[in-house]
Every structure is written in structure tokens, then in C-alpha cells.
Image (tube, rainbow, N blue to C red):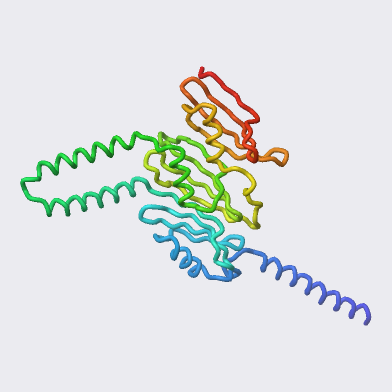
Amino acid sequence: MKKATIKAIASIIGGLIVFTIAFFIFQSSPSTSQATMSEEEAERLALEQYQGDVLSVEYDDGRYEIEIKGDVASYELKLDAETGEILSLEEKTDSNQVASEKETNENATSQDENRNQEKDDSTNQENNETTQNANKNGTKNVVISDLDAMEIAHDRVPNATMVEFELDSDDGQLYYEIEMHTDDQEIDLEIDAYTGEIIMYSFDQLEGTRQGYSDIMTIKEAREIALAEDSEAVIKEINLDRDDGKYYYEVEMKTSRYEIELDIDAQTGEIVELEYDDWD
């Protein structure tokens, strides 16, 4: 009798253990039913900030991953399923679409102006349009300065510290690649080196907050120190680096004769290393 009772109790306990394990496995498996907000709510929140057509919405590990295609840009973002906070974003601009819309608007403006002109001014109007088109084509071949690119980046993210700056190219497209930091975000931008247009913008939300950069000089100040070594040099790259607890700006410049590399103490402004390499 006692053995039967013990077996019964053991069977009940065993069943409870199996049920408990199965319950926790089910609870830990990712599904949209676990999310505080629904897929529709996440989609609505995303579209309130980034207009376009939603291409996909996926739930994974407590966040929604959403892709949106807009008229002139596409967006990939991760949204916290509990708070609705955007944890990361990548925004890519369709340069061809932007140029097409700009041309359409300019043509519409030109047509409105033509309606208000007398017929005998038509020849002059055609000459003006030809000159404008020539100017546009010429502007395409002029690279905006590094300072202009820095200003464009700071206009987009006013309170961020620039930590990386580089003039780069890809598939024949020349662009400025920039990384910036705030207390709680890491931000990346790509700026068309000819038009000044931001062709890519992304950020990642940090889980905590980082120590600020208030005790070091800005990347613009490091640039001025570097160019004081050779005023004819062109800045190619500037990176903020940390070594043994100290911050340094690593700068790469070029002239018609040399490649120049400098390390600048980010607190004192002292040039701690300077190298000239001949073009080979």
C-alpha cells in the first residue's frame, strides 16, 4: 500500500515537472503574442515617423524589424515591442528619385515664369535655360569641401560629437563617410561629395549612456592644427582614437607630392607624431 502511494506521488510530481518545463519552453519561444504591442501598432508607429509603403514586419527577441519604402528614401528600423522606442534606423536616399523630383519642380517653376513673360522674350528665356543646365552639369564636377560636409552632418545631428570623417568612393560615387556620437546613440552618415545630399543616415540606440567628449577638442579644431602643417594639403581622413586612456586624432592628408599622417593629442592639441611619405 505504501509503495503504491509513493509511486502515485512520484508520478504526480514527475508530471508536474514535465508540465513546468514544457510551460517555460513555450513561454520562452519568440512570438508576436509575447509583444506588448501588436504588429499593426508597431507598423502604425513606424509610419507616423517614416512615410511610405511597409515592405515587411518581423518580430524577433522583443523587437519589431520593419522595412519601409518611401518616395525618395527607404528605411530599415528596429522598434522596441514594449516601449515603441526606435532602437536603430538605416535611411537610404534614392539620389536618382531626388534629382528627378528636383528637375520636375524646376521645370514647373520655369513654365510658370514663361507664362508671365512676353512672347518676344522667348529667345532670351531659352538662352537662360541653356546656361542654367550648363551650370548644373559643371557643379556636378565640383567636390564640396570637408568643412561643408561637416556642417551638413552637424545640421542633421546638432548635439553629436564627430569621431570619424573620411572622403571615400564606391562604384564611382564619391562621398563623405562620417560617424558621430551622442550620449546614447551611434550615428553614421554618408554625404554625396558633389551635391551635399545625405544619401545614408543610420543610428543605433545604446543600452546605457557613454561618457561625453567635453574635455577634448573638436574634429574641426584637430583639422585646423593638421592643416597648419601644410595649408595646401587636402584632408582625407580623421579618426578619434583612444590609447592608454588618452584620446588622439589620427589625421591623413595629401598634397601633390606627399601623403601626410599626424597623431594629435585631443586634449592639448600637441602633434605627437608626424610622417611624410612621397607619392610613388
Q: Nearer the viewer, residue 272 or 108?
A: 272
Point 40% across, 52% down: residue: 73
Left or right: 25 with respect to 280? right
The spot of residue 230 in percent (x, y) is 51, 26
Instruction: Please name the residue shown 52% across and 47% down the image.
Output: 188
Residue extending farthest left:
120
From the top left corner, tell me how far across and down residue 43 is, in percent: 47, 65
Q: Position of residue 11 (x, y in %)?
A: 83, 75
Residue that extends furthest to the top in the rendered view of this protein: 280
Q: Nearer the viewer, residue 211 or 51?
A: 211
What number of labels is visible? Answer: 0
The quadrant of the rendering that contains the N terminus is bottom right
Residue at the right extreme, as displayed? 2
Q: Answer left or right for 177 relative to 109.
A: right
Coordinates of residue 251 in the picture (x, y in percent)? 57, 33
Residue under the image location 56 percent in, 21 percent down: 277
> Left or right of 62: which side holds 147?
left
Which quadrant of the figure has residue 208? bottom right
In the image: residue 132, left or right of residue 9:
left
24 w.r.t. 118: above or below: below
Query: Against 56, is 94 above or below?
Result: above
